[in-house]
Image (cartoon, grey):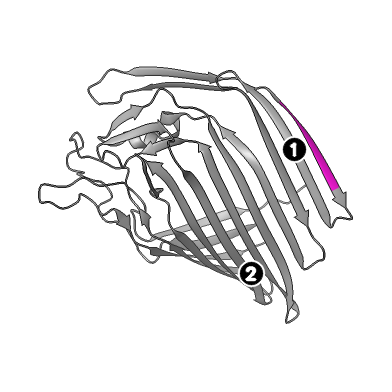
Amino acid sequence: YDDYDQSYKLSHTGDTLGARDKEVVPGAYVQYTYNWNDKLMIMAGLRADYSSVYGTFVTPRAHVKWAPNEIFNLRASAGKGYRATHALAENNYLLASSRRVVIDPDLDMEEAWNYGVSAALYIPLFHKTLNLNLEYYYTDFLRQMVVDMDSDPHEVHFSQLKGTSYSHTFQAEASYPFFKGFTLTAAYRLTDVKTTYGGVLRERPFVGRYKGLLTASYQTPLGIWQFDVTLQLNGGGRLPQSYMLEQGIPAWNNRYKAYEQLNVQVTRYFRHWSIYVGGENLTGFKQKNPIIDASNPWGSNFDSTLTWGPMHGAVYYVGVRFNWERL
């Protein structure tokens, strides 16, 4: 049971509008699981729901896991997904700009097929275990609420998908304990997400093309000290289409570049408590000019929604953690 009660203004001089969205969805499902010697597991399911807003819809899904030995296992999945949309409740941050808000009356429930496959390997190496994980997921949208900020740089348009929309995600991760107490983990994710905006298939804005992660963790033999270091690489991406200034230049770049962030934390453990000190974004990267026309918040060009990176530099912190033993 969902009940959204909203009041809002689509312009600072306009009237206050109200909207109340109610949806009741009873449903039932059936599921079957087949297990063959814990080496092959197959699960199939089928769910039927009735929405008081969208009517009846059926959701199938299937999962397969194959683990022939202790070193390797493979998983695969496929299924359909549905989601009710609430344009303003889910995107209220977009109201912090001078963009006109247009919501089409024919927005329907989102519908997509999801497919995925993942593999995990536990490889004995120098009397330790190297953990490798590979995964790939694909989502194909049949129906989708599109948040279009490209067709008109002074407007945000919530419309029904007319064209193609999909998401490809590939991730690889490796972890290895080089010596007692020290573990190094590396991960890399590649993303390809595109949607049709105004008849043109484009990259989804604010979605980084890739992300990398390198984490080192060390705990002293007696477990008194813990050291954690994380280096994160955030790939560049696309921003919504810009308008042109009087000088004939765009108000903002239509792409942003990759940037790095370094986080460090040191923890000292005691019997019933611990103290930790650390820092985030120690590389000090900051997005320049994150607010468009910040000096004129009631003007037609003001926009504070084009943030894609940190807006502060390095941050340092200290904390205390208490631990109570279970009775």
Q: Mark 2 = which residue?
A: 175
N-term mark: 1 or 2? 1
Left or right, residue 289 beside residue 320: left
Across and down, in percent, residue 300 comes to: 19, 35
Relative placement, left or right, of 17 versus 61 is left
- Residue at 58% x, 33% y is 82
Relative vertical location of residue 232 with respect to residue 154 in this rendering, above or below: below
Q: Amino acid at mark 2?
A: Ser
- Regarding mark 1 in the picture, which secondary structure is present there? strand
Query: Which residue range is magenta in the image?
Result: 28-34
**Circle 2: element type:** strand
Quarter the N terminus occupies = top right
Q: Amino acid at mark 1?
A: Gly
Look at the image and say whether residue 312 sits in the magenta stretch.
Answer: no
Q: Is residue 229 above or below residue 16?
A: below
Residue 155, by quadrant, is: top left
The quarter of the displayed image where residue 37 is located: bottom right
Closer to the camera: disc 1 or disc 2? 1
Residue furthest bottom in the image: 126
Residue sitting at 68 percent across and 49 percent down? 77
* 142 is higher (above) or lower (below) than 254: above
Position in image of residue 196 (x %, y %): 40, 42
**Dot 2, how many residues are within 10 Å of its Cα: few (below 14), some (14-19), or many (20+)?**
some
What is the C-alpha distance between the residues marked 1 and 2?
A: 34 Å
- Asked if residue 197 is positioned above or below residue 49 in the image, the reply reads below
Displayed quadrant of residue 53:
top right
In the image, what residue occupies the spot 17% across and 42% down?
295
Q: How many discs mark residues in the rendered view?
A: 2
- Front-lying residue, 288 or 318: 288
Residue assigned mark 1: 45
